[in-house]
Structure formats: C-alpha cells, structure tokens
Image: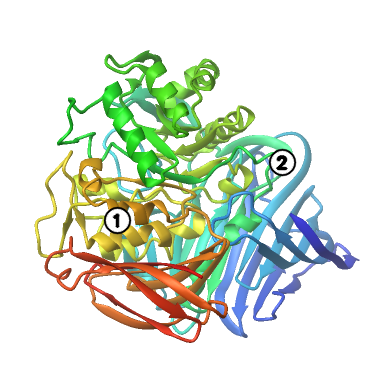
Amino acid sequence: MKTVLIIAIFSLILSLGVGAQSYSLLSPNGNITVQLTTGKTLSYSIQYKNQPLVLSSHISMQIADEQMIGANPQVISSLKTSVQETIIPPVKQKRAEIPNNYNQLILKLDNQFEIQFRAYDDGVAYRFVSDRAGELTVNDEVAEFHFAAGTQIYYGKVSAREDADIFHTSFEEPYSVSALDSVAENILAYSPVLLNPPGLPKVLITESDVNDYPGMFLVKGEGASVRGKFAPYPKKEIISGSEFKLKTVIERENFIAKTKGSRTFTWRVIGIAPNDADLLINDLVYRLAPAPAFSDFSWIKPGKSTEEWITALNLYDVDFEAGLNTATYKYYIDFAVRFGFEYVMLDAGWSDVNNLFEITPGMDMEEITSYANQHGIGLILWTQALTMEKQMEQAFEQFKRWGIKVIMTDFIDRDDQKAIRFMHRFADECAKNKFMCMIHGAPPPKGFSRTYPNMLTREGVLGSEYNIWSAKANPEHDLLLPFIRQAAGPMDYEPGLLQHATRSQTTKLGFEKVIAQGTRMHQLAMFVVYESPLQLFSGNLSDAIREPELMGFLGKIPTVWDETIIIQAELGKYIVEARRHGDEWFLAAINNWEVVEFDIPLDFLEEGSYQAEIASDGINAAKNPHDYKLTVSKLSQNGKLNIKLAPGGGFVARIRK
C-alpha cells in the first residue's frame, strides 16, 4: 500500500449532556451523507444526493452482564479524518491499483468502546472497536438496515437441514427475488444481499474483516428492513456425515463470541450503486479488510487448473483405465502442459478422506508429484477440513516434500466463531509454509483474500457442480452472481463444461457426464467475467482435447487483471466488459436466455492497429449450444465490434497490438 494523504480534520470533546447528539459525514464526492444520532439508542441513516436511501437504523452490541453498547450512548469525543491512499494488491482481482479514498468519523464512548463510520464514494461501512483489557463475551449484535416501502430484495435463502440447525449451510443457493416487506420472518439469508429501493441506487449489504467472530446472516426486520443474525458459539459438536465428514453443532451457547477485549470488530458494509455496472466494480469489501501480515508474495502464482470431480475422471479414447491412478494424473499433467494451464487438481479420493497418509491404491504419489515438478505444473490437493484440522502439521511436512503448491480444504459448512477461527488458522499456516490455498463448503471470503493473498479463491457459490443433480446453475443465475456474490470476493464457480443444452432441452444426465445450460461460449466467457485468481476448468479432458484451438484460446486467458471497464450491464440480463492484463485486452460478454446484440466502441484501446482473436456463439447456437466459431479480425480504437449473443450465450475477444 502506498499512502498519499491522511488529514485529521477536527477533534472535539463533548460534554456528557442529556439528549440526542447528531453527527454527519460526507463521502469524498459529496453524494453520500451519513447521519448518526445518539439518544436512547445509537442510530444511523444514509442519504444519496439528498434522497433518503437507508432510513434510521439501530446498531448496538450486547456485552455479557452489561448494558448494551449503543443504548444511551455517552460520546466523550468525536474525530473526523480524510484518507486518500492507493492499495497495491499482491493478487490483482479487478485492478492493479485500488484508490482507497474515504472520510471517517470516530465516536469515542465512555465505556471503552468506539464506533467508526467511513463514507466512500461507493458505499458506507461501520464497525465497533473495543479498548478493554482481558476477554469480552458478546451475547449479540444489533445491525439494522431499514428501507422505503416497495424495496425489492435479492437473497440466498438458507435451506434447513434435517440433521443440523439452520446455521449449517454450504452458502450455495439460488437467489430469491421478492418485495422486502413480504419476506417471511423465519427466512435466514446469507450475505451479500442486494436491495433495490424504488427510484434510488441499489444497495449491497455484506461485511468485511470477519475475524474471531461469527459471520452475519440476515433476517427480516420490521417493515421494509433486514437485520443481522449471528450463529451462537458451539457448545457441543458431533462428527456427522457418511462419505464426507464434518463437525455438526448439536448445542449452542447463549453468546455469539468470546474474544479479546482490545480489538476491532467486523465491518458492516453498505455498498451503493447508482448504476448496475457499479455493482461489478465495487471492491469496498477488499479495501476494508486488513492488509496481509507478511510481505513476500513472490511464491503466490495465480493461474488455471484442471478439475476432475464434476466429470469424475471419466476419460475415453485413452490406452489406460481412467480413474484414481497414476496414469490418469500424468495424462492431466500432459494436458496442462500442452494448453498452458499452471495447475492440476487432485480432488477427493487421492487418499482416504479421513487419513491423508493412507494413499489410494493405484496412486503413486512420488511418481505423480515428480512428474508434475519435472513439467513445471503445480499440484492442488483436496482435503477434508475435519482431517486437515487433525493432521495439519504432519500433512504440511509431507506436502512440502512432494512440492505441492495449493491446498484445498472442504466441508466446513458453518461460519460461527469456531469455524471462522479454523479458516484463519488454515490460511495462516498455509502462508507460513508458503502454500497457496482455497476453501470449499464455506462462506464467501468477505475481505479474507486481502488479508491472506495466498487464499486464491473460495467457494460459497452455487456453481458448475449443481449441473450434476439440478437445473439451478442456469444462465439466469449466472447473470446474478457477478452483481451480488462477487462483491464479497473471488468465487470458484468452476466453469468450462463441454456438454450443453438449451433452455428447452434435457439437462440432467447425472454424475460423470454433466450438461451445462447455455452455450459453449457462455462457459468460456465466465473465465473472464467471473473473478477468481485460481480458475478451475471443469470440462472433460477427452472432450477438450478434441478442440485444441478452443483449449489454446482458454489457455491464454489470464486470471488476474490490471484494469476492468464495464461497457454494458443490466442486473440479471447481460454483462459486457473489457479487462486488461499487461498489454492485452480481453473483451467478454455473457447473457441470460434473452438474445442480445451490441455494437461495442473500442475507445478503451490506445491508438494503433490491433488484432483480435474472437470466440463467439455460432449461427446455430440457439438450437445447438455447442456451436461456436473462432475468427481473427483487425481492429482500431475508432472502430466498433459487433457482439451477438445466443440464448445463454457468450463472447470473448483477445485483443493485442
């Protein structure tokens, strides 16, 4: 991070008088106004261009055996500051330089707590800070978000499980859309959620810097509002599951966290987007997260990997029996070398899931790892979180001997304080041992990828695997994810399936031979539109190798970006964007089931002549979504590029001088 300017504006000591005090805070461009009021409660409201956006909402924190922090708050001082700085991310998700400009208001209370508010041009955030000795027990936190009547909400509804309480979830749900005031009170949603107040900017509600504290779910509040809900601390856990095992909480405490008395708490984030395109470039969650504690990032290498689980290693036309064996993984490594992939994933099954040292018969790990290292291909190893927690130290020693580059862990399915602690420990130990890592069966990262840049991606998204057993991963869903889920950080969707269906065609074949809805180019364009510094290609390699030109095109798509420009975007309908990596531009588009066509100005290019390698939907893609074409065109800054997308379609152009 390079700091440009930090200015203290004023510090004011206030008398401890009776009655409400009011404080205001403006965003740097003056469009957003935050109003804080202290009286019987601590409340805030937000205006956008003098229009009420978030109505008066209460915030507080209940500390055990004390009056609630925020009830009858006594302010002893206030401090306003302005910050202008630039964050240089070690792993570039949207851009190589991130302006981090905001105005901040800190209210210091008389109980060794303070509340911090920040106003940015694209949102507002607040958090509690404690300066107490010893340990704190937090019984609950109140976080309210009130909106005008008629507000619409997009949310991922947590599905109840038969064998666990409602706080157990993989954070993988399709988005429900409804009027906010009609949402049932018993529905639990995970963040981010998107609010659409009538005639006003859209609002994203999520969080950042979730550390030693539970994540925030959301439930319906009074009227048109939502409020935070937090999983109580686990009191008693059991081991459950059949093929894959995990810890399940069967009894919880009457508090949500026991933690250090001197600390900052989680940022509550309110992203504000006047236009749908603004949702796609909002990286407020990243900016609010703490910088990494380490400074050597030379060993962190983003890239693309093969992925095997969705297609179950179901190769064909090979001279060996495909499956969990040495020959199969050497074939995967050869594929990665040929098409410019950096990694090969060894998913569940390379060892006993409950014992990482019990290698599956037929798997010669010494030969596989040696072969990968000789060919410059990094290996990713899947692990079960329960097993990783037990065997982390010994397993890491073995993984270092093998030269493993990335460790994945799976099946946490919670974000209470105990689960959050494990994820931090896992990422921290990986960093100390110079392993990159990723997590499945877990909430979205919510700033985690800034604090741990070695954490290249995270699940917490309904992605390609859902094509195995449902029709949920469809183009309509695909066109909501970048506007909502992506605001919380990288998402491991695992695109690239090579069997396709239109909206009216049969989509479910089942495990090993999986069909994706939409076109071949829809899958390809996800590699540009969806942000994940580690992208996993989920197609069957035996299908892929029959299309070497397409795989060569995919192999050239980067996974990190120096610049992102949103050209056209409408929530749930289509996205057209240009991303720059070094001297190359990638222009990509995806859509839902509605056919769209664009003439895209190329004024984002510098002057000069350019060549574009173009991958687009074929003329018959509406009926046969496998149909696509690869062409080469000459372009210039003053020209336009026509993009026509089939139903559930896609487009990618690689543009070079």
What is the x, y in percent for residue 446? 54, 51
Dot 1 falls on a residue whose secondary structure is helix
Q: Answer above or below: position of 236 versus 574.
A: above
The reply to whether dot 1 and dot 2 touch (C-beta < 8 Å) is no
Q: Nearer the viewer, mark 1 or mark 2?
A: 1
Q: Position of residue 540 (x, y in %)?
A: 23, 43
**In the rendered view, would you say 562 is above or below 416?**
below
> Which residue was labeled with disc 2?
295
Q: Residue 237 at what x, y percent from top left?
A: 42, 25
Kind of element beneath mark 2: loop
Numbered mark located on residue 550 in the image: 1
The vertical placement of 645 against 243, above or below, is below
Residue 82 numbered mark, or none: none
Near-viewer residue (215 or 145): 215
Q: Is residue 9 visible?
A: yes
Label 1 vs 2, first from the N-terminus = 2
Q: Residues within 10 Å of mark 1 (few under 14, many from 20)?
A: some
Q: Nearer the viewer, residue 81 or 55?
A: 81
Specify whether 120 is left or right of 195. right
Q: Up-down: is 29 above or below 399?
A: below
State the residue in front, 654 or 152: 654
- Which residue type carries mark 2? Ser
